[in-house]
Amino acid sequence: METEFKGVTVEVVRGNIVAQPDLDAIVNAANAQLRMGGGVAGAIHRAAGPGLEAECRPLAPIGPGEAVITGGHGLPNAHVVHTLGPVYGRDQPEAGLLAECYRNSLRVADEAGVRSIGFPAISTGVFGYPVEEAAEVAFTAIKEAVPALRNVRSVRMVLYGEHDHAVHVGAFRKVFGPK
């Protein structure tokens, strides 16, 4: 599912975040130390190789909502944007911090000249953010950030599981209108 909004294509796909070779950058749902970890961070670090963690080391730690950018190393993408999502029930305000993850990721990517970027569902794994709430926050933040983008022309939300994909399609329709 996709739409064009103010000159930027926004889409939702089911797939693997590390298997998006047509994107300039992918987003890592990182931990504060920007280390391998589990979930999305583990998958990205394994696919990118040890050079990614070495490049990340001097950039850590980051706080909830912050974003930094590195090279893609062994990934087919030129860049990885790392952002730390909020832990649901602990980091406050949750929705504000989650929205900052998307806005700041888009900002640092745009500043680096990235034309296309893919996001996972930030904070919805071990950080416990309910997928339904997170999806609406994500698309609202993306929609709000698009008018300021100079370089990014494509934003893709990449969901691994069928349920997460279906929930994000519903949130996409709610925020961007039915397509």
Image (spheres, rainbow, N blue to C red):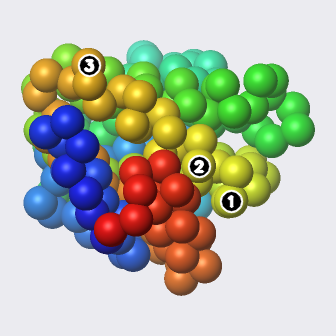
Q: CA distance from mark 2 to mark 3?
A: 20 Å
Q: Residues within 10 Å of mark 2 (few under 14, many from 20)?
A: many
Q: Position of residue 126 (x, y in %)?
A: 73, 55
Residue occupied by mark 2: 136
The quarter of the picture where residue 97 lies is top right
Q: Is residue 179 above or below residue 51?
A: below
Q: Nearer the viewer, residue 162 or 76?
A: 162
Label 3, label 1: how many angstroms apart (C-alpha)?
Answer: 26 Å
- Residue indicated by mark 1: 132
Q: In the picture provided, is 26 more to the left or to the right than 97?
A: left
Of residues 141 and 91, the one drawn nearer to the viewer in this rendering:
141
- Camera sees residue 53: no
What residue is rendered at 28% in x and 52% in y? 10
| Spatial CA span between label 1 and label 2 | 7 Å
- In the rendered view of the protein, which quadrant contains the C terminus? bottom left
- From the viewer's perspective, is residue 111 above or below residue 33? above
Tell me the kind of residue under disc 3.
Ala
Identity, as a three-letter code, of the amino acid under mark 2: Glu
- Left or right of 159 on screen, residue 134: right
Q: Do residues under tags 1 and 2 come within 8 Å of each other at their CB atoms?
A: yes
Residue position marked by numbered label 3 in the rendering = 148
